[in-house]
Amino acid sequence: STRRPNVLVFFTDQQRWDTTGLHGNPLGLTPVLDRLAAEGVSVDRSFTCQPVCAPSRASLQTGQYPTTTGVFRNGLPLPRDTPSLARSFREAGYATGYIGKWHLAGDHTSGPVPEEDRAGYDHWLAANLLEFTSDAYETTLYDGSGAPHRFEGYRADALGTAAIDFIDRDRDGDRPFFLFLSFLEPHHQNSRDDYPAPTGYRDRYATPWVPSDLATLGGGNWAEHLPGYYGMVRRLDEVLGRVVAALERRGELDETVILFTSDHGCHFKTRNDEYKRSVHDASLRVPTVLRGPGLWGGVRLPELVSHVDLPPTLLRAAGVPVPEEMQGRSLLPLLPGGDGGHGGDGEEAEWPREVLFQISESEVGRGLRTDRWKYAATAPDADAWNDPRAERYQDAYLYDLRSDPDELMNLVADPAHGHVLEELRQRLVRRIVDSGEPRPTVTAHKPTPKDGSEDTA
């Protein structure tokens, strides 16, 4: 076909990477996703730019780091003139649609989102804060005119049905579509701090498989909530199956680029007093799968990939120009056959050896996740809610992922790792500057300095 492919983003909320069969979960929660990965591309080491809802969503809409967009914490609106996926696809002739949770219109609304705050999407059926306009079996979404639409049945099913309705719509001239389908599951229900699975699904996983970090750390509330959490993940995969079946029925499955990913993970209050906002892989690492034209072969990418890399990947997979403002890099050059024939903009250069992440709300931090190391520096004197960045950070976390994959032993004060910290400190400063922030000072961790001196980068 000479027509550009459809593009579908299936976006979950707060889903750990190890909930999936392709990452070793033994409960059979994700057979549909596992099959898509076996046919397409699994981004095996995929990480959010920041483990909290609005900042990560801003990155996925723009291909920019949270502090570049200005959405460095929840409650801040995405700037109205920011280049976005929807605008790029619309300019290329796509019918664009958004369904589900938005969380990028600021705090002035929990439900209807003004047109100017929708980042360029045309078809609209969403709520700014879906967690506050819905419950497991009570779903309200708002259309483009702000009118409420109430759905019966389980919330994830309702969103899936709305997506299938969009896919089945008649589009002028058989235009391809770009649909961003954004769920709340498996996020907790804020009003009662619960993980409400569909009726009967919690009982299926009453004796759950427990990830090793949770089992070893103890504490938290995973023992109470894993059964419901897993039930929600299972139902999401069933909804994914319905959407895939709708595309197949229309003969469009193999002409559709599908991206499955999540905004961040979940540590079940084992790292701090909530569910994310920490430097650990339980918060940062997410499942990411791509399938469709140019994305075949059961490839398992070993590279470290950031959320900012996914928007340019989608655009280039569709043959749509990538805005210069996007800070990520397309994954297509990493695949067999190069970039799928869409351009030659130098992205074949060596892939970065680390991903940069930012932390807000719990602390102001910046960090790197490399193949072996997790390193982060924080600004103890900064205001974690109001300060998007700091001029000065100090070493706070160092984990050797080779010997300690569950990040249980913080080595930041271990003198034997001083040379490792020095190198990572320098790399972090370079990546911070590359992300568009002013060059900060990063100070070595010295809990009991004898001479008052400090090593800085």
Image (tube, helix red, strand yellow):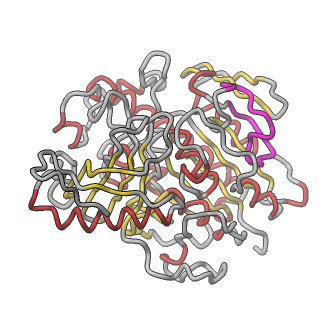
What is the quadrant of the N terminus in the image? Answer: bottom right
The answer to whether residue 275 is left or right of residue 445 is right
**Percent position of residue 132, x then y:** 59, 21
Nearer to the camera, 23 or 312: 312
| Residue 454: percent from left, percent from top | 22, 56
Q: Position of residue 432 (x, y in %)?
A: 45, 60
Left/right of residue 389 with respect to residue 106 in the rendered view:
left
Q: Residue at x 42, y 50 (%)?
A: 286
Judge whether residue 59 can be spotted in this image. yes
Which residue is nearer to you in this view: 286 or 401?
A: 401
Nearer to us in this view, 74 or 125: 74
**Residue farthest to the right, as pictured:** 172
Q: Is residue 120 magenta?
A: yes
Give the residues in magenta: 108-127
Residue 279, above or below 420: above
For image coordinates 49% across by 50% down, the residue present is 32
Residue at 61% from the left image edge and 78% from the top image edge: 340
Work out whether 70 lies above or below 295.
Answer: above
Magenta stretch holds residue 291: no
